[in-house]
Amino acid sequence: MRQHYGVVIIGLMAVLLATTVLSLATGPSPLPAAKALRILLSSLPGLDGLAPEASASQRAIVLDIRLPRLILALLVGAALGVAGAVMQGFFQNPMAAPSILGVSAGATLGATAVIILGLNFWVWGLSSVVVAAFGGALVVSGAVYILSRRGGRTPVTLLLLTGIAIGSLCSAVSSFILFRGQQGDLDLVIFWMMGSLANRGWPEVGMVAPYALVGSVIVYVYSRDLNALLLGDEQAYHLGIPVERVKLILLVLASLLAAAAVAVTGIIGFVGLVVPHLIRLMVGPDHRILLPLCFLAGGIVLGLSDMVANLAGEIPIGIITSLLGAPFFLYLLHRRREYEF
Amino acid sequence: MSEESILAARQVVCGYDERDVLHGVTLAVTRGEFVGLIGPNGSGKSTLLRALTGVLPLRSGEVFLEEQSLSRYRRRQIAQRIAVVPQLSGSIFPFTVRDYVMMGRTPYLGRLQGQRPTDVKVARQAMELTSTIHLADRPITDLSGGELQRTTIARAVAQDTSILLLDEPTAFLDINHQHEIFELLSRFNTQRGMTILCVSHDLNLAAQYCPRLVVLKDGVVYADGLGSQIISEHMVREVYGAPVQVDEGPAGKPRVSLLPGEMITSEEGHR
């Protein structure tokens, strides 16, 4: 296994580079890839003479529109990939995803409420929808955790079922609010639930970046704990892991990562599920290598998906990720002889 | 607790939810002992192991590790002293045997610390001792039951503890692999001075390998002493409710044989 870690890392780096260049070059007004790359590099100090022929509008398209959107896609994808890997380790189940904790349901409830009730405000350049979705995700996943405590412990099955119950409850409330809403607002909510990176910029990058970067680094510190948790709570205990404390920390981190991601983009399915799966197939279950690669690959998958979404006439990215992710996931499931990951 | 005990329980009461499983268990294990813990299903054997390792909170009573209250230890410190081999181990995640055994070093490594040459050496020795070194690159998901159990014992050995607790380590193994595991434990006990407490359902295996036997019944210690004194037709009938004949086996240890056709249907024996 270990020998090809390097190959996988180099491969992913190459794909990341290609994704970057392609994303910056493609869009409603396409540019040659080399030119887009030169415009990008010319924004770095000391390289400002690199793209003298680029017009001001071309520079603006690449640096002010496509670059923040690309970075946002990479960060959101990275956050979802890492959050998914954490949830799968946490639940000792390769089928787990951040949505189990009610993150998506909570975010949807927050966003729906704000849109339908017509609450429009801005916080640090972020719309009320982002703020409400983030808040909703955190409140709901917190509630799921608190309701799953039992005698100082948080049994994973209880957490799972509580997540399902609270998720349904949130969906019901969201549906009711939607049902009372006006036609135009309904469209907004539906579009939000399909996920999109269109018209997002630096403020959204600024919001997601701290969570995606700092959160992922802290998660990485707990790699060995996550490995032990894959053997089950009791065995992790016997290996000296303070299981309950570690689980709480990981749960908070996974919720923050997923909540920040979903808040700015809306619901994006399958990235948190498929990316850790795929990487695990390539490098095995050791989180010390799995987590960094999920960060990288999650970003790449979302970057590429957003490019497809953009090229296909701004269709919601959630449609792309599920459309590509679900069949791929089915393929992964069927290609294994036994139920093992 | 007059003699110097390495692991002891004093009047331990604990259980799950509203139900107590152990109703005041007192037991002291001396350094270097090999103790077999026997008793019928539901008598509290696994629960006692959980209590002794601090996994299950006590309702009352106390557990002592190296003569200090277990509650004064951190998780990590306990894991540096007690290793546990569960009934069913492994994972559906395909760690290699090497990585799995290396997890035994977790209690010695800081969160950001890489594995040191000592860790690699200890893990390697553990695999050699348990004859799992040839499996090192295989995923644990591909192993047979016997191989997996040996690998888990290797992980426990890599934990480099003075105490080894096992919960029916041979429950899912055939007779040959059962003996292999108990031979291994016997060697750890005599050659490495490991203190071993092993839950077993197999009275013959327990009598053959464990010099001392502790019998649990209904959450209390029913009997505690030398294997040859503990195993008797009367005890098995009283504790398990099973009609048996006990004679002397070829190794001079008690041998338990079921008597066919005779069933005791009283509620006393079973619970």
Image: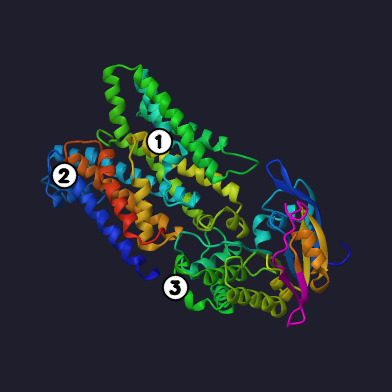
Chain of the residue displaying label 2: A
Badge 3 local density, few (<14 within 10 Å), some, or many (20+)? Answer: few
Chain of the residue displaying label 1: A
Name the secondary structure under disc 3: loop
Name the residue carrying label 3: B137
Asked if residue A325 can be seen in this view, the reply is: yes
Q: Amino acid at mark 1?
A: Ser
The vertical placement of A57 against B252, above or below, is above
Q: Amino acid at mark 2?
A: Thr
| Residues rendered magenta in the picture | B245-271
Residue A59: percent from left, percent from top? 17, 41
Q: Is residue A23 found left or right of B202 in the rendered image?
A: left
Badge 1 local density, few (<14 within 10 Å), some, or many (20+)? Answer: many
Residue B67's image quarter?
A: bottom right
Residue A80: percent from left, percent from top? 38, 45
Q: Which mark is residue A104?
A: 1
Residue farthest to the front, as pictured: B261
Name the residue carrying label 2: A26
Q: CA distance from mark 3 to mark 2?
A: 45 Å
Q: Which mark is residue A25?
A: none
Q: Nearer the viewer, residue A61 or A228?
A: A228
